Structure formats: C-alpha cells, structure tokens
Image: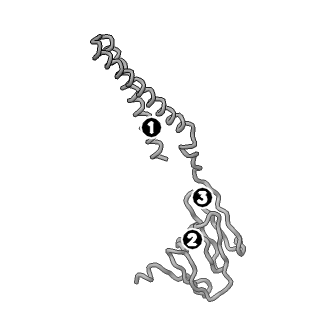
C-alpha cells in the first residue's frame, strides 16, 4: 500500500507512464516520443490539471494539452504542448525579492565595528585614568584625586554601556542576516 501512495499512473492516449511522486522522474515508458522539459531555474513543480507530476527536468509524453509550472519566487507559467519544443529550456520570470547586500558588506557594519573599537579604547583609557587617580588619592589622601576618580569611573561606565549597546546592535544584525 505504501508503494501505491508514492506512485501513480497517468494515461496519455493509451500509453502508460509510471512516475514517482516524490522524485518526479520517469521510470518506464513504452513510447520513445518523449519531451524533456527543462526549466531555468531547475526543480520547478510541474502540474497536469491539479496533480503534481514531478519536478524539472522531467520527461513527458506528448498527450497533454497544458501544464502548469510553479516555483516559489517565480511567476507561474501555463505551458501548452504547442509551445514546447524538444529539449527547449523554458524560462520562468523571477518575481521574488532580491536580497540586499550582506550585512558585512554594508557601511553600517563598518561603523558598528569601528564604534566597538573606539568605545572599547575610550573605556579602557578612562578606567586606567580613574585607577591612577585612585592610587594618588590613597597615597596622598587628597580629595581632589578621589573626585577625579569618580568622574573618570563615571565616564568609563557610560562608554562601556554605549559599547554594550553597539555590540548588541551588531549581534542583532548578524543574527537577522
């Protein structure tokens, strides 16, 4: 029974052809007057009336009147037997959305990466200045060094926060690409 679910028989003017529904390839034909249906792009769904008979490239009997060719992102094409010539490639018109450049090739990637480097350097610079001022405060006990330490730590914290936001935006764009 499983075998019958995967295959079906199509009758074309008393010629019997066996097709595999999952692969769309022809296994047996008693007539050698077959048409090889090739499309650009390949792997296009081929329908006879409302039944899927395979994917291109596909060998067909000449007993059909019209076929319907469908593929996601491409315009559906109705193909009559009269329109099809032996070994002709049928072109489907692309109607999908062209994908933009990669995120890594866009200027925003370079800005975000440059921002991460600049903000990382600024964070490190202000943290080092805060640490030096704190060391001076511990050595001398002068409150002005402690005030400078707090100011530089605040600036370092702000630049680190902006660095984290910048890095988050970079990761977001990377994952949504």
**Is there a contact, CB below 8 Å, between mark 1 and mark 2?**
no
Within 10 angstroms of label 3, few (less than 14), some, or many (20 or more) residues?
some
Q: Is residue 175 above or below residue 119?
A: below
Q: Position of residue 75 (x, y in %)?
A: 61, 59
Color encoding of the figure: one colour
Closer to the camera in the image, 170 or 116: 116
Within 10 angstroms of label 1, few (less than 14), some, or many (20 or more) residues?
some
Quadrant for the N terminus in the image: bottom left
Answer with mark 1 or mark 2, whichever residue precedes in sequence: 2
Q: Secondary structure at mark 2?
A: strand
Q: Quadrant of residue 58?
A: bottom right
Q: CA distance from mark 3 to mark 2?
A: 15 Å
Answer with mark 3 or mark 2, whichever residue precedes in sequence: 2
At x 56%, y 83%, the residue is: 27
Q: Residue 74 got which mark?
A: 3
Within 10 angstroms of label 2, few (less than 14), some, or many (20 or more) residues?
many
Closer to the camera in the image, 22 or 127: 127
Q: Secondary structure at mark 1?
A: helix
At x 46%, y 39%, the residue is: 170
At x 55%, y 59%, the residue is: 72
Q: Residue 169 got which mark?
A: 1
Answer with mark 3 or mark 1, whichever residue precedes in sequence: 3
Q: Residue 55 got which mark?
A: 2
Q: Is residue 149 above or below residue 13?
A: above
């Amino acid at each position: 029974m499983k075998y019958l679910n995967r295959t079906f028989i199509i009758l074309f003017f008393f010629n019997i052809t066996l097709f595999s529904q999952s692969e769309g390839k022809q296994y047996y034909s008693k007539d050698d007057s077959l048409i090889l249906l090739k499309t650009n792009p390949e792997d296009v769904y081929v329908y006879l009336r409302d039944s899927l008979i395979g994917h291109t490239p596909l060998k067909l009997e000449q007993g059909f009147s019209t076929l319907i060719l469908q593929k996601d992102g491409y315009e559906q094409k109705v193909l009559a037997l009269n329109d099809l010539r032996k070994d002709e490639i049928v072109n489907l018109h692309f109607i999908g959305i062209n994908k933009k450049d990669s995120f890594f090739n866009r200027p925003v990637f370079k800005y975000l990466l440059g921002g991460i480097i600049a903000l990382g350097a600024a964070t490190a610079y202000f943290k080092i200045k805060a640490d030096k001022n704190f060391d001076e405060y511990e050595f001398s006990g002068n409150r002005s060094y402690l005030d400078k330490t707090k100011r530089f730590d605040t600036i370092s914290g702000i630049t680190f926060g902006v660095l984290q936001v910048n890095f988050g935006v970079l990761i977001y764009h990377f994952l949504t690409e």
